[in-house]
Amino acid sequence: MTGIKIAIDGPASSGKSTVAKIVARDLDYIYLDTGAMYRSATYLALKNGVSLTDEKAIIKLLREYPISFGRRKDSQQMVFVGDVDITDPIRGNEVTNNVSTVAALPLVRQALVELQQQIANQGGIVMDGRDIGTVVLPDADLKIFMLASVEERARRRYKENLQKGIETDFDTLKEEIAARDYKDSHRKTSPLKPAEDAITFDTTDVDIAGVVTFIEERAQKIIDSL
Ligand code: DC
């Protein structure tokens, strides 16, 4: 037994990656942040002056500069394209406000989904994204769809930015999150939606520890039953 597959989906800033990282660490599983992969593709397009809708050119860039992950000394995940460390730039405003356009491109999704499925074959995994339960790992053992109100998600992102020393306008944040939600859930290819067999969990009034416990209890039951 090499471990189970856990899919965590949900809208922007719902806390998926924070929770997924903790669950993966506690279970000693691989953690895969699929949003970071769409952000990497967006970074490559912006950096190389390629149109954000030119999927063939973006695929070519992804072949030339393959995405890989590493770990900092403080165990924070690092993201590379080729040998360039893009951990910080992919969290910047330019990438964040353009990533939904690139994530809507079918060929880009196909290439990244293949990569995600290959990584999942290596063993126990916690993967977070928008289409993990529906498209990437339809056979996942546990599927969680994390929700939270736009107001609460903007509040969380605002606090996170403050901690990083980034000044942001709360209302602008709220608008940007709502715009990304709209684009992610209305695109033709693999829109954001819960899988039929996903457990939907509204985290608006639940803290991180509460969400982690909720997921780990369910994961443990599945692991014990195998
Ligand atoms: O989770 P995130 O904010 O880092 O994701 C960045 C963008 O990538 C988001 O706007 C939607 C897209 N995405 C996607 O379409 N499919 C995934 N599996 C993960 C992210």
Image: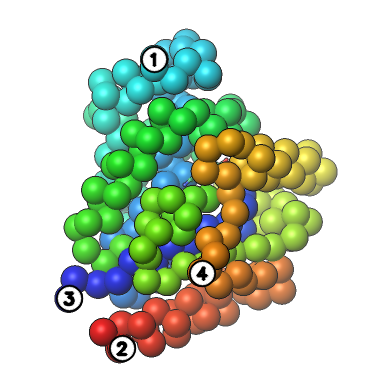
Query: Disc 4 marks which residue?
Result: 197
Assign a secondary structure to mark 1.
Answer: helix
User: At label 4, which amino acid type do we have?
Assistant: Asp
Is 154 or 5 nearer to us in this picture?
Answer: 5
Q: Is residue 73 above or below residue 57?
A: below
What is the distance, in whole Å, between disc 1 and disc 3 at their CAs? 40 Å
Quadrant of the image for the C terminus? bottom left
Looking at marks 1 and 3 on the same chain, the residue that comes earlier in the sequence is marked by: 3
Query: Disc 1 marks which residue?
Result: 57
Left or right placement of residue 211 versus residue 75 in this view: right
Q: Nearer the viewer, mark 3 or mark 4?
A: 4
User: At label 3, which amino acid type do we have?
Assistant: Met
What is the distance, in whole Å, between disc 2 and disc 4 at their CAs? 18 Å
What is the distance, in whole Å, between disc 3 and disc 4 at their CAs? 23 Å
Can you tell which mark lies on residue 149? none
Is 185 or 18 nearer to us in this picture?
Answer: 185
Q: Position of residue 144 (x, y in %)?
A: 51, 68
